[in-house]
Image (spheres, rainbow, N blue to C red):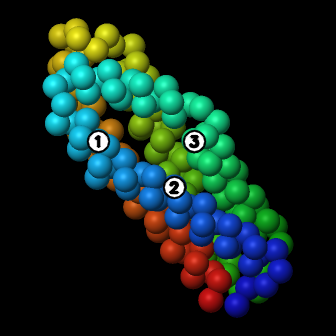
Amino acid sequence: MIEGPYLVLGVLGALATGLMAGVFYAFSVLVMRGLGALPPAQGVAAMKAINTSALTPAFMVVFLGTGALCAVIAVVTFVLWPEKGTVELLLGSGLYLVGAFGVTVAANVPRNDTLMKLEAGTSEAVRYWPTYVREWTMWNHIRAVASMAAAVTYALALV
């Protein structure tokens, strides 16, 4: 079993990435399904409101804080190279930083930015909405799986 600061970092990493996995999962299987069932103008308007509320501290502290925590775990692990749990701690960090944070920046945010530029009732928004829902949800599934894999990997570092 890992000890000292690695134990604390591993527990925090497992909890934080597990929390984000739950957020991403719930969004994929509940929110996006519900929004996708709405008429496009309503779905676009609702998603734009959700994207605006996601930029508040309540979500951003958890999302960015988890990314920062994973980066700290990776750096501390790489620099100090503990006797146990090294592979798991580095892998957990990589899974979240690339599979959740990186995918957010490279895939989900650009789609959100495109959607934010559209007026909900326009023909352009109506045409884009099905593509947005399909692609955004697919990338969100990847974020959920990567976050859960990171949580499991951090938990494995603890045993």
On screen, residue 82 versus residue 158, left or right, reads: right
C-alpha separation, residue under disc 1 versus residue under disc 3 = 18 Å
Determine if residue 99 is in view. no
* Residue 85 location (% of width, % of height): 67, 81
Q: Which residue is mark 3?
A: 59
Give the camera-side residue of 40 and 149.
40
Tell me which corner region of the image, top left, top right, bottom left or bottom right, holds residue 133: top left
Q: Which residue is mark 2?
A: 20
Number of other residues with Cα within 10 Å of mark 2, as a class: few under 14, some 14 to 19, many 20 or more? many
Q: Secondary structure at mark 3?
A: helix
On screen, residue 32 versus residue 97, left or right, reads: left
Amino acid on which disc 3 is placed: Phe
Q: Secondary structure at mark 2?
A: helix
Q: Report the residue at 46% width, 65% height from top.
A: 148
Give the camera-side residue of 48 and 89.
48
Number of other residues with Cα within 10 Å of mark 1, as a class: few under 14, some 14 to 19, many 20 or more? some
Give the camera-side residue of 34 and 141.
34
